[in-house]
Amino acid sequence: MTHWEKIQYYYSEMPKRGRSPVWATPSQRVPAVYRLFGRLGIEVRPPIFASFGALAFVIGGCFAVMYGVANWLIFGRGHYSSVAQMIFVFVFAGALFGAITARQIRRLSKRLKLPDWDHYPDGR
């Protein structure tokens, strides 16, 4: 089964498990960076099948960059005493956000008893 066939199967199976593929509550939607990867044609497994580390790194890294740019545009450098402090705050915020989001997604995956992506959809 190809990657895109697995994705289509995933979209058809999730309602049977009581979830829509793009979940109803905002906190459980597919993260924007993963939707972007799909639109660009990059074969990435859905976040619910990704490892904790991969989720934390991708989501947290993107958050740190976006948070840093927004913070820089709103407050400028004058809000921080040094560039090192500014970078530390952005990286810490990204790591924290990435870890919390990854934990929530992995917990949902375990609750739905999903197999690893390599063994999906057969579960073998």
Image: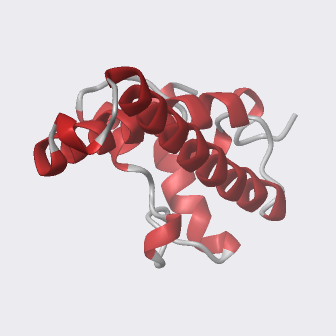
Measured as percent of width and height from the top left, residue 26 is found at 43, 73
81 vs 101, nearest the viewer: 81
103 vs 37, nearest the viewer: 103
Quarter of the image where the C terminus is located? top right
Q: Specify whether 38 is left or right of 46.
A: left
- 64, above or below 54, in the image: below
Q: Residue at x 34, y 33 (%)?
A: 81
Q: Residue at x 82, y 55 (%)?
A: 110
Residue farthest toward the right in the current orientation of the protein = 124
Measured as percent of width and height from the top left, residue 32 is found at 34, 48
Colouring used for the render: secondary structure
Q: Residue at x 48, y 29 (%)?
A: 88
Q: Residue at x 49, y 40 (%)?
A: 94
Q: Specify whether 124 is left or right of 99.
A: right
**Residue 80 in which image quadrant:** top left
34 vs 92, nearest the viewer: 92
